C-alpha cells in the first residue's frame, strides 16, 4: 500500500517535469559566456565547479540509491554492525580537500586578474541614484544620467495592462531576446578593445552595477569609490541591472552598455560634447507656460510618478500626495527647495544634480498646475539657474536660506 | 515551581504517576500555558508557535510568488513587495526555524540526557513568552502608515534608514527575539552541563544534544553582535551618530561586516540542530548505529569554528582588498570538508543497514539529498570570481532555499513525525504522512529548482517585476510555491488527527529506536526522570 504511494509519487514527479521542461525557455538556463576574456574565464570556472558538483552528487546519491534498494528490510537484508573506521574518515576528508585545492588555484588566478586595475585606457565614473545611473567620462568630460526608458516605465506601473510581449518585441540582438525593462534613455557608449576602468559610487543608498556579459558586478557605496574594469572584445549591446536592493524601484534601474569601434566612439564623444555645450541655452531663454507644462509632464512621468503616482495622489503613509499638497500649492520657494534638496531621511532624493534647470522649472510648473492644483504659477529655467549659481560652492545644502534671500522668488513670481 | 516539584519526589514515587498528576500535574485551563515551567509544555508552546508562524511567513512567500507569476506588476505595490521579502525572511528565520528547534530542544534534551527538566525552568517560560510579543510588534508594522520594513532582512544602511516610523518597532522586536534566543541558549548550555544523568558522558550524548550544545554557543556569541549592529542603526537614525554614514566619518560597509559576523554563524544555527535530528533518525530506520559518531562531533565543532571566519563571502562585491577576497574564498571552501564528512557518514550509516521507509525516514533522506544539492551550490558560490556573477541573483535564492526548506524545514518535519508518537502516545496516519512527504517533495523542487536557471541567466533577487526571458520559469516556480504551500495544510491535519487519537504507540515506538527518550512511557509523562536513570557503559544512549 505504502510503496504504491511512493511509486505513484515518483511517476508523477517525472511526468510533471517533462512537459514543464518542454514548454520553458531553454535559452535562459545558464550563465552566458560573455564578451570579455575575464567573463570567459569566469564561465569556465563556473562550468568546472558545476561538473565537480555533479560528479560528487552522482557518486553520493548513487551510493544512497543503491543502498536504499539493496539494504532494505523488505528484501530481508540484515543490518551490519560496523559503525566506525578512521581510515575511511581520513579518506573522505583528504579527497575533498585535494579537489578543493585543485579548484582554488585557478579561481585565485582569475580573481587576481580581475583585481588588476592598472594600465586602464579610459575611466568612467558610475554613480548610483534612486533609481538611475549617472555616467561621467573622466577623460572627455561627457556626463549624463541613464534610466529606464519611459515606455517601459509606463508599462510596468500597477494596472498598466500592457501586453508586454507585443509591446516590447526587442531588437533581437541575441536570438529571441526581448527588451522589457532592459532599455534606457541614454546608453553607456564605450569603445571595444580598450581597458575601461569603472569607478563606482552612490549618491544615496547602496546600489550594485552589474553587466553579466562583462562579468562585472560591484557595489556602489555612498562615500566610497570602488574600482572595476573590462575590456570588451566585440561590438554589441550588453544589458545589465542593479543587483543590490535599493528601495522601491530597485527592479527598474537597468544598465545598457553599447560597445562600438573606436572611430564611432570618438564621433559619439564629439557629439556629446557639442550637445552639452548647447544645453546652457535652454535655461537662458524665456519659456512659455504651455511649453513648461508639457515638458514638465514628461519629466514628472520619468522621475516622480513611480512614488507620487500618476494622478499625484501619492501612497498614503509612504509617499506624500502632490495633488492639493501644501508644498505644491503653497510657497514656490519651499516647493523648489524640496525638489532640489530632497528631504533628508526619506526616499525623496536631491534632484538639483539629476535634472537640468529646464527640467526642474518644467516639472515644478507642471506640478503646480496639474492634479487640480491650478495655481497658475510659472517658474522659468533662468530663475532656477540663477539660484543654482549661488549655491554651487556648498553643494546646495543651505538652499532654503538662499531662497529666502532672493526677493524675486519669494512670492508667486514669474506668473505667465 | 517545578524545581520544588522535583525535590518533593523521592525515588520510590516514580511508579505511581497518576498520583503525581493529581498533585503536581499541569494546572488546569489557560493559566497552565502562561505560568508553566515544565520543559514539555514549553516545548509544545514553541512548536505550535512556530507552526503558526510557518503559515504566516508562507502566506508572505505566496504574495511574492503570486506577484512574480507573470511579468508586469499586477497585485502589490513594489514597496509592499519589498516588505513581504523582508518579513518573509525575518518570520521564517526568527519565527519558524529557530523557535521550532528550541521547542525540540526543550522537549527532547532533558529526556535524552536523563534529566528531570531544563536547568532554568522560569527563564525557560520567559524565553518563550517574549516571542509572541516580539512578533506582534514586528507584524504590527504592516498596519502602520509607513508600511512594514522594506529594506531586506539584512537591514543594510543607508537604505534601512529611509524606513518610516516602523523602523524603531522593528529594532525593538529584534532585540526581544535576541533576548529570547540568548536566554534559551543559556538554559540549554546549563542543562547539558549540569543535568546529565550519572554515566551520561559527553561522548554518550545523542548527536541532537551535541549539535544543540554547539548551536547554543553560536547563539550566545553572535546574537549580542547583531543586537549591537541594530542598536547602532537606531542611534544613527534617531540620535545623530554616524556609524554607518560616510558623511560623518562612518562606513556603510562596516554594518555588513558586523551583520554577517552574526549572519553567517546564524546560518549554522539554522542547520546544526537539523544535522542532529537526521543523525538520530537515520540510524533508527537503518537499524544500525550512526557511522563515525566521533567524527560527526568533531565535524560539527569544526563547522562551528569555521562559521566565524567566512562571513565576508556574503560581501565579495563590496570592494574588499584582494587579500581579503582570497582569504574568505579559501575559508569558505574549507567548510565543505566537515559538511561533506557528515553527508558521507549518513550514507555510510545507511549502507548495509536494514532500512524501512516510514515518514520520518523519508523526510530525513529527503533532507540529506536536497541539503546536499544546496551544499553543492554553496560550493559553487565559494568560487569568488563566479560568486561575483551569482551574487544577489536567484541562484543564491535557490541555494539558501534548498538548505533551508528541504533542509532545515524537512528536518523539523522529520522530527515531528519521529517524536509525535512519543509526545501524544498515538501513531500518526502513516499513509497521509507519506503522501505529505511526496507531494511536498515534488512541489518544493518545482518551486526552487528553476530558480537556479533564472539566477544563472541573470535575474536579480528582490525584484517585483522581471524581463520576459524569465517568464516561463517564474511561472513554474509560482505553481510549485502554491502546491507546496497548500500541501502543508496536510501537515497540520495529520498532527491534529494524531493529537486527538489514533493507534496507540508503544514505549519504543520504532523498532530500531535508540536512546533514553524511548525508555519512558508513550505519551511521555508530565515529569520524566525524576530519578536519574542508570547508565552503564553498555547502555545505548544514542
Image (cartoon, coloured by chain):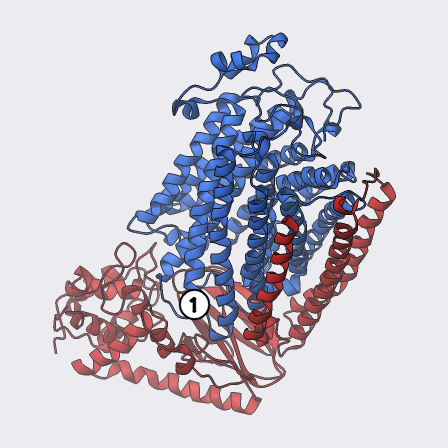
Q: Position of residue B169 (x, y in %)?
A: 36, 42
Q: Residue furthest right?
A: A87
Viewer-nearest residue: A327 or A279: A327
Residue under numbered circle 1:
B465
Name the quadrant containing residue A409: bottom left
Horizontal side, residue B402 vs residue A298: left or right: right
B184 is higher (above) or lower (below) than A186: above
Q: In the rendered structure, the residue with mark 1 lies on which chain? A: B
Q: Name the secondary structure under disc 1.
A: loop
Q: Position of residue B87 (x, y in %)?
A: 43, 49
Q: Residues within 10 Å of mark 1 (few under 14, many from 20)?
A: many
Q: Residue at x 62, y 77 (%)?
A: A34
Q: Is residue B465 visible?
A: yes
Q: Residue at x 15, y 70 (%)?
A: A408
**Chain that the image shows in blue:** B
Q: How many marks?
A: 1
Instruction: Decide: is B298 above or below B314.
Output: above
**Residue B210 as seen in the image, left or right of residue A99:** left
Placement of B121 over or under A316, stated as above or below: above
Can you say which quadrant of the picture contains the C terminus of chain B? Answer: top right
Q: Quadrant of residue B447?
A: bottom right
Q: Residue furthest front?
A: A1
Chain A representation colour: red
Q: Position of residue B92 (x, y in %)?
A: 49, 46
Tell me which residue sits at (62%, 64%) in the image: A14
In this image, A285 relative to B522: left or right?
left
Q: Residue at x 32, y 71 (%)?
A: A303
Residue B318 in view of the camera: no
* Residue A294 horizontal/vertical position (percent): 22, 80
Amino acid at each position: 500500500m505504502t510503496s504504491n504511494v511512493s511509486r505513484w509519487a515518483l511517476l508523477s514527479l517525472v511526468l510533471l517535469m517533462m512537459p514543464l521542461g518542454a514548454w520553458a525557455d531553454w535559452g535562459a538556463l545558464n550563465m552566458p559566456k560573455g564578451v570579455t576574456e575575464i567573463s570567459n574565464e569566469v564561465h569556465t570556472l563556473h562550468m568546472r565547479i558545476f561538473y565537480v558538483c555533479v560528479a560528487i552528487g552522482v557518486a553520493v546519491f548513487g551510493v544512497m540509491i543503491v543502498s536504499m534498494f539493496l539494504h532494505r528490510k523488505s528484501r530481508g537484508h540484515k543490518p551490519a554492525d560496523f559503525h566506525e573506521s578512521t581510515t575511511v574518515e581520513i579518506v573522505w576528508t583528504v579527497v575533498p580537500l585535494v579537489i578543493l585545492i585543485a579548484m582554488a588555484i585557478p579561481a585565485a588566478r582569475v580573481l587576481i586578474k580581475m583585481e588588476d586595475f592598472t594600465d586602464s585606457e579610459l575611466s568612467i565614473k558610475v554613480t548610483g541614484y534612486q533609481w538611475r545611473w549617472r555616467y561621467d567620462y573622466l577623460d572627455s568630460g561627457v556626463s549624463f544620467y541613464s534610466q529606464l526608458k519611459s515606455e517601459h516605465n509606463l508599462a510596468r506601473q500597477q494596472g498598466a495592462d500592457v501586453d508586454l510581449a507585443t509591446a516590447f518585441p526587442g531588437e533581437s540582438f541575441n536570438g529571441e531576446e526581448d527588451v522589457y525593462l532592459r532599455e534606457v534613455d541614454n546608453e553607456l557608449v564605450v569603445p571595444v578593445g580598450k581597458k575601461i576602468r569603472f569607478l563606482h559610487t552612490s549618491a544615496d543608498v547602496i546600489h550594485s552595477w552589474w553587466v553579466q556579459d562583462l562579468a562585472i558586478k560591484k557595489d556602489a557605496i555612498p562615500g566610497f569609490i570602488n574600482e572595476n574594469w573590462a575590456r570588451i572584445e566585440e561590438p554589441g549591446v550588453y544589458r545589465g541591472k542593479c543587483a543590490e536592493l535599493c528601495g522601491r524601484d530597485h527592479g527598474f534601474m537597468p544598465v545598457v552598455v553599447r560597445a562600438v569601434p573606436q572611430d564611432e566612439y570618438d564621433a559619439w564623444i564629439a557629439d556629446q560634447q557639442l550637445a552639452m555645450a548647447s544645453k546652457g541655452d535652454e535655461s537662458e531663454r524665456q519659456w512659455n507656460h504651455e511649453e513648461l507644462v508639457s515638458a514638465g509632464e514628461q519629466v514628472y512621468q520619468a522621475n516622480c510618478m513611480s512614488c507620487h503616482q500618476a494622478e499625484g495622489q501619492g501612497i498614503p503613509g509612504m509617499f506624500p500626495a502632490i495633488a492639493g499638497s501644501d508644498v505644491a500649492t503653497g510657497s514656490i520657494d519651499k516647493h523648489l527647495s524640496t525638489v532640489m534638496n530632497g528631504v533628508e531621511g526619506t526616499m525623496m532624493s536631491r534632484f538639483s544634480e539629476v535634472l537640468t534647470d529646464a527640467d526642474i522649472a518644467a516639472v515644478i510648473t507642471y506640478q503646480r498646475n496639474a492634479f487640480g492644483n491650478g495655481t497658475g504659477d510659472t517658474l522659468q529655467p533662468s530663475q532656477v539657474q540663477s539660484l543654482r549659481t549661488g549655491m554651487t560652492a556648498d553643494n546646495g545644502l543651505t538652499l532654503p536660506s538662499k531662497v529666502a534671500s532672493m526677493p524675486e522668488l519669494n512670492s508667486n513670481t514669474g506668473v505667465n | 515551581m517545578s524545581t520544588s516539584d522535583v525535590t518533593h519526589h523521592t525515588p520510590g514515587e516514580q511508579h505511581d504517576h497518576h498520583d503525581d498528576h493529581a498533585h503536581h500535574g499541569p494546572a488546569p485551563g489557560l493559566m497552565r500555558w502562561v505560568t508553566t515551567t515544565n520543559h514539555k509544555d514549553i516545548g509544545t508552546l514553541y512548536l505550535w508557535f512556530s507552526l503558526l508562524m510557518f503559515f504566516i511567513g508562507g502566506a508572505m512567500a505566496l504574495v511574492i510568488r503570486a506577484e512574480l507569476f507573470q511579468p508586469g506588476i499586477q497585485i502589490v505595490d513594489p514597496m509592499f513587495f519589498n516588505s513581504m521579502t523582508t518579513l518573509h525572511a525575518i518570520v521564517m528565520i526568527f519565527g519558524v526555524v529557530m523557535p521550532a528547534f528550541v521547542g525540540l530542544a526543550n522537549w527532547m534534551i532533558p529526556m535524552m540526557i536523563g534529566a528531570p527538566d531544563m536547568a532554568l525552568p522560569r527563564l525557560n517560560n520567559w524565553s518563550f513568552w517574549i516571542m509572541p510579543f516580539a512578533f506582534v510588534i514586528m507584524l504590527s508594522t504592516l498596519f502602520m502608515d509607513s508600511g512594514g520594513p522594506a529594506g531586506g532582512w539584512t537591514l543594510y544602511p543607508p537604505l534601512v534608514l529611509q524606513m518610516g516610523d516602523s523602523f524603531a518597532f522593528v529594532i525593538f522586536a529584534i532585540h526581544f527575539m535576541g533576548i529570547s534566543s540568548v536566554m534559551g541558549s543559556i538554559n540549554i548550555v546549563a542543562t547539558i552541563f549540569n543535568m546529565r544523568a550519572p554515566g551520561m558522558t559527553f561522548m554518550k550524548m545523542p548527536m541532537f544534544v551535541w549539535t544543540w550544545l554547539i548551536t547554543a554557543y553560536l547563539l550566545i556569541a553572535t546574537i549580542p553582535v547583531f543586537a549591537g549592529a541594530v542598536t547602532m542603526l537606531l542611534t544613527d537614525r534617531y540620535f545623530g551618530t554616524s556609524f554607518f554614514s560616510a558623511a560623518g566619518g562612518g562606513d556603510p560597509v562596516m554594518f555588513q561586516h558586523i551583520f554577517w559576523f552574526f549572519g553567517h554563524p546564524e546560518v549554522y544555527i539554522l542547520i546544526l540542530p537539523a544535522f542532529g535530528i537526521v543523525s538520530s533518525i537515520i540510524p533508527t530506520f537503518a537499524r544500525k548505529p550512526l557511522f563515525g559518531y566521533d567524527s560527526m562531533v568533531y565535524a560539527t565543532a569544526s563547522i562551528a569554528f569555521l562559521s566565524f571566519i567566512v562571513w565576508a563571502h556574503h560581501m565579495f562585491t563590496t570592494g574588499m582588498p584582494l587579500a581579503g577576497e582570497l582569504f574568505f574564498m579559501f575559508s569558505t571552501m574549507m567548510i565543505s570538508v566537515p559538511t561533506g564528512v557528515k553527508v558521507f557518514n549518513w550514507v555510510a550509516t545507511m549502507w548495509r543497514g536494514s532500512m524501512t521507509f516510514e515518514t520520518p525516514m523519508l523526510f530525513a533522506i529527503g533532507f540529506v539529498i536536497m541539503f546536499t544539492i544546496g551544499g553543492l551550490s554553496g560550493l559553487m558560490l565559494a568560487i569568488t570570481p563566479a560568486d561575483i556573477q551569482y551574487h544577489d541573483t536567484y541562484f543564491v535564492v535557490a541555494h539558501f532555499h534548498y538548505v533551508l526548506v528541504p533542509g532545515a524545514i524537512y528536518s523539523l518535519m522529520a522530527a515531528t513525525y519521529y517524536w509525535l508518537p512519543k509526545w501524544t502516545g498515538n501513531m500518526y496516519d502513516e499513509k497521509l504522512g507519506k503522501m505529505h512527504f511526496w507531494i511536498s517533495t515534488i512541489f518544493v523542487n518545482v518551486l526552487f529548482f528553476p530558480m537556479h536557471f533564472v539566477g544563472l541567466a541573470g535575474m536579480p533577487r528582490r525584484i517585483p517585476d522581471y524581463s520576459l526571458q524569465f517568464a516561463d520559469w517564474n511561472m513554474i516556480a509560482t505553481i510549485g510555491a502554491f502546491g507546496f504551500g497548500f500541501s502543508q495544510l496536510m501537515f497540520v491535519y495529520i498532527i491534529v488527527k494524531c493529537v486527538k487519537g489514533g493507534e496507540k504507540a508503544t514505549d519504543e515506538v520504532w523498532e530500531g529506536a535508540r536512546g533514553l527518550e524511548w525508555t519512558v512511557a508513550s505519551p511521555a509523562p508530565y515529569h520524566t526522570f525524576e530519578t536519574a536513570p542508570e547508565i552503564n557503559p553498555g547502555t545505548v544512549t544514542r
